[in-house]
Image (cartoon, helix red, strand yellow):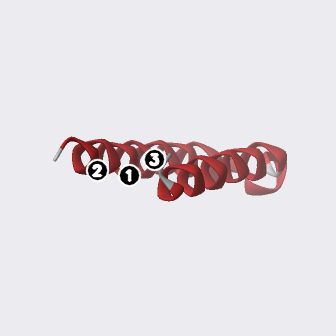
Amino acid sequence: MNKQFWFTLIGTLLAAWALFHFKTYLGPLVLPLFIGLVLIVTLKLYSLMDKDDS
C-alpha cells in the first residue's frame, strides 16, 4: 500500500490520542481541534484516493 496513506493514518491516530488524552488541559479548544483534525484527515485521504484513481 501507499506509504503516505500509512503515515496519514498513524499521524491521525496519534493526534486523536493526544487530543483526547490532554482534553482536560485543552479545555474549550478540544472541539475546534477535533473538527480541524477531521477536516484535515478527510481532505488528505480524499486527495490520496483521487490521486490513486488517475
The three-letter amino acid code for the residue at tag 3 is Val
Comparing 7 with 3, the one in front is 3
Relative side of 50 to 48, left or right = left
Q: Position of residue 18 (x, y in %)?
A: 77, 52
Local secondary structure at mark 3? helix
Disc 2 residue crowd, few under 14, some 14–19, many 20+, Cα 10 Å: few
Residue at 58% over, 50% down:
6
Contact check, label 1 and label 3, Cβ < 8 Å: yes
Residue at left offset 66%, top offset 50%: 10
| Residue 2, horizontal then vertical, whole percent | 47, 51
- Residue 22 point in image, percent of width and height: 82, 52
Judging by the rendered image, the residue that carries numbered circle 3 is 41
Residue 49: quarter of image:
top left
**In the visual, does 37 lie left or right of 17?**
left
Three-letter code for the amino acid on which mark 2 is drawn: Ser
Front-lying residue, 7 or 42: 7
Looking at the rendered structure, the kind of residue marked 1 is: Lys
Q: CA distance from mark 1 to mark 3?
A: 5 Å
Find disc 2 in the rendering and name its residue.
47
Secondary structure type for disc 1: helix
Mark 1 to mark 2 CA distance (whole Å):
5 Å
CB within 8 Å, label 1 to label 2: yes
**Residue 20 — which label?**
none
Mark 3 or 2, nearer chain start: 3
> Mark 2 falls on what kind of element?
helix
Task: Say if mark 3 contacts mark 2, CB within 8 Å.
Answer: no
- Mark closer to the observer (3, 2): 2
Which residue sits at x=53%, y=57%? Answer: 3
Q: Which mark is residue 44?
A: 1
